[in-house]
Image: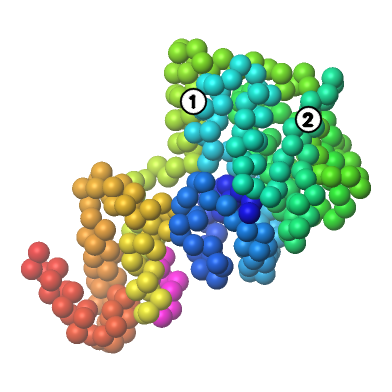
Amino acid sequence: MITFTLFRQYLALLRKRKINIDSLLAQSSITCQQLEDPNCRMSAQQHDELWDILLNALPESQLALKNNDTLAPASFSSLMYLAMSHQQAIDALTTLLNYKNQGSAIQIQLQKTKHNIHLSFNSDLFQLRHWQYFLLLAAQHILDVLSWLKNEPVSPVIIQVPKNIPSSFAQFLESLKPCIKISEGPPMLVFDVNQLQFPLTGSHPHVRAILEQQTKHELLQYQSQENMVNELARYFLQCFQNIKTIENLKVALTLDKAAQHFFITSRTLQRKLKQHTSGYSAILDEVRLQRYEQGLQQKLKAEDLAEFCGFSDGNSVQRFAKRLVKH
């Protein structure tokens, strides 16, 4: 088994780019519980299966990491813990890697010499058919973690990689091209030891307050400025527009599927909606009513109107309209 954290963060990144990956994930053996569980592990087979699906459905240019991408936001709680619990960045990074290595076949080892810090990957990495992508995501994540802890970009002095790394996938490698060294040895990130020996003072109450404030500010960059009611309504509209069959549409409009779309549990989704005094069914009814009124304006026939609103027959859409009129 290997950690699922990196891939979960990557999927969230694709969602931010407005790439519809729900139908692609539905083709895999990954369950909703695995997506929602931060402690989940995935098998090598599941890892390769997910990459097969993505690479067959989308061009590599869409899947590529951009220079401004980051995989750290999903780990802010871990970063806060690291910043508050250690005095040195190297100790904090060691703690994080030890945690991620637990129960994972893919190990990231930290070795310190007089002049350098070596972060290397074990040979089990190559058991993955798409090991290159795991390596690139892991490297991106490590750079993000260190940059967050130092509050400025941290770059390795050497990136040791085997041949056949798809540079088109990782544009961040382009900016670090002078550091890249093709080698027959294991993949490795090498940092100047002085660059990673910066102190962390998060245990100080005043600094902790500053870190918490900064974290909230950073998180806002990765959250929509609109509330969950609007986001859910937009999800419903996408379902009506993109799903062709009534059977699949009914499944997509369920509470569980909607929660899966937002990478949260159904209970969390209901709680978020309650904050805005709206219920799940009420929002769905409102979107259906909009579709119903549009259909009437377009003078759709009864059967077409029912399908347009996500109902299986004309009687259902008429009962829906009467119910809303009564309220």
Q: Indicate the amino acid at tag 1.
A: Gln
Q: Is residue 223 above or below residue 217?
A: below
Majority secondary structure in the magenta region: helix
Left or right: residue 193 compared with residue 101: right
The residue located at (53%, 62%) in the rendering is 30
The residue under label 2 is 111
Q: Position of residue 239 (x, y in %)?
A: 40, 68
The residue located at (77%, 43%) in the rendering is 121
**Nearer to us: label 2 or label 1:** 2
Quarter of the image for the C terminus: give it: bottom left
Membership of 130 in magenta stretch: no
Mark 2 vs mark 1, CA separation in Å: 31 Å
Question: Which residue range is magenta in the image?
Answer: 237-245
Q: Is residue 190 above or below residue 251?
A: above
Res. 169 in view: no
Q: Which color scheme did the rendering employ for the protein?
A: rainbow
Q: Secondary structure at mark 1?
A: helix
Q: Label 2: few (<14), some or many (≥20) within 10 Å? A: few
